[in-house]
Amino acid sequence: MTNSSVMEDTLKLLKDHKLRVTPQRHIILAYLASHHNHPTVETIRDALSKELPNMGSSTIYNTLNTFVDHRLVVELQNGDGSTHYDYFGTPHYHAICTNCGKIVDVTYPGFDKDEKTLEEKTAEISGYMISGNHMEVYGLCPECQVKLGITQKK
Amino acid sequence: MTNSSVMEDTLKLLKDHKLRVTPQRHIILAYLASHHNHPTVETIRDALSKELPNMGSSTIYNTLNTFVDHRLVVELQNGDGSTHYDYFGTPHYHAICTNCGKIVDVTYPGFDKDEKTLEEKTAEISGYMISGNHMEVYGLCPECQVKLGITQKK
DNA sequence: TAATTAACTTGTAATGATTCCAAATTAGAA
DNA sequence: TTCTAATTTGGAATCATTACAAGTTAATTA
Ligand SMILES: [Mn+2]
Ligand SMILES: [Mn+2]
Ligand SMILES: [Zn+2]
Ligand SMILES: [Zn+2]
């Protein structure tokens, strides 16, 4: 995917959601859509400091909160004390390393089906009117397994 | 379950985990084991102020962190800004109200199986050595549906 | 039972992520 | 181009959680 098409796509996305298009919003959304690093606010600020040197972190918080409200972005915690953000273009869930905090995307054929089943069962049992879910799986990432000298039993 | 049997059971639990038995730990664990209210630190402090008027909130934080390390307790966020704690006696997951923050327990026959399947698939796909998971489902609780005048389509 | 000590509790201070706020700027409508 | 409500900015305020030093205590040992 070219850089310009990311800019076009995210511009369209903002307009489709009736969000006012500011350079800050556009650049932050494009950054998230083209990186899978699950960044914190600080990471985003550093990454965009060339393009928008005067952008304050309140703007990043405001912007991300807006995106979360519109479900363009999801929030994640990996235990390091700050919130991580993730562009949610295609449905997936996360594996999070309990040692280093690394977050990776996971999905598999039929995940959307499983997810829907879970929501339906939950609605039936709890009476809640379901609007979404989060699932996370914890463990040691491959690097940390090596680093800690742990052998995975097959 | 009688009050005294909760005290006996939680005492045994602490000893099984080789945790030093202090009145604070014992009473906090007994409180969590006998309430399903998913309390915050403040809620716990208020609830136990009669029995332990001098207990500081740092002690509650320390104690809960210890219990989380030993997997006796899990942490939950409901979006109100503070962490909620839950005695994890039997496997279950949570439905969380996006309007009022109410957290309810959910389980169903075969949940443990589904959970295991998810962990196995995740291990295979990601290479992580899995140690646990969290799943949460979001929506409007029955009370908030009424309060907000929303009709659930069948 | 008494002595010993590492572990725990307490109260307060420090931290740090996030939100709040007032003033300046700006996107989009007319 | 004009107008204005929405947004951005930067700095202060908030508040949940952690850090720390001093006092206390659970459990071990003799
Ligand atoms: Mn992701
Ligand atoms: Mn629960
Ligand atoms: Zn790792
Ligand atoms: Zn509710």
Image: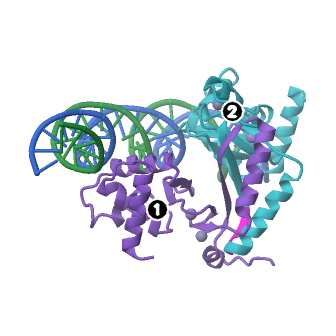
Chain colours: A cyan, B purple, C blue, D green
Quarter of the figure that contains the N terminus of chain B: bottom left
Q: Residue at x 81, y 39 (%)?
A: B125
Depth order, front residue of B114/A91? B114
Please say whether residue B138 is visible from this viewpoint.
yes
- Highlighted range, magenta: A127-131
Residue A141 is labelled as 2
Q: Residues within 10 Å of mark 2 (few under 14, many from 20)?
A: many
- Spot occupied by residue B2 in the image (x, y as percentages of width and height): 41, 76
Depth order, front residue of B72/A66? B72
The residue tagged 1 is B39
Check mark 2 vs ligand 3: CB closer than 8 Å? yes or no: yes
- Spot occupied by residue A133 in the image (x, y as percentages of width and height): 71, 57
Q: Residue at x 88, y 28 (%)?
A: A4
Depth order, front residue of B40/A97? A97
Quarter of the figure that contains the C terminus of chain B: bottom right
Depth order, front residue of C4/A69? C4
Q: Main secondary structure of the magenta part?
A: strand
Q: Residues within 10 Å of mark 1 (few under 14, many from 20)?
A: many
Which chain hosts label 1? B
Name the side, left or right, on which C13 lies relative to A91. left
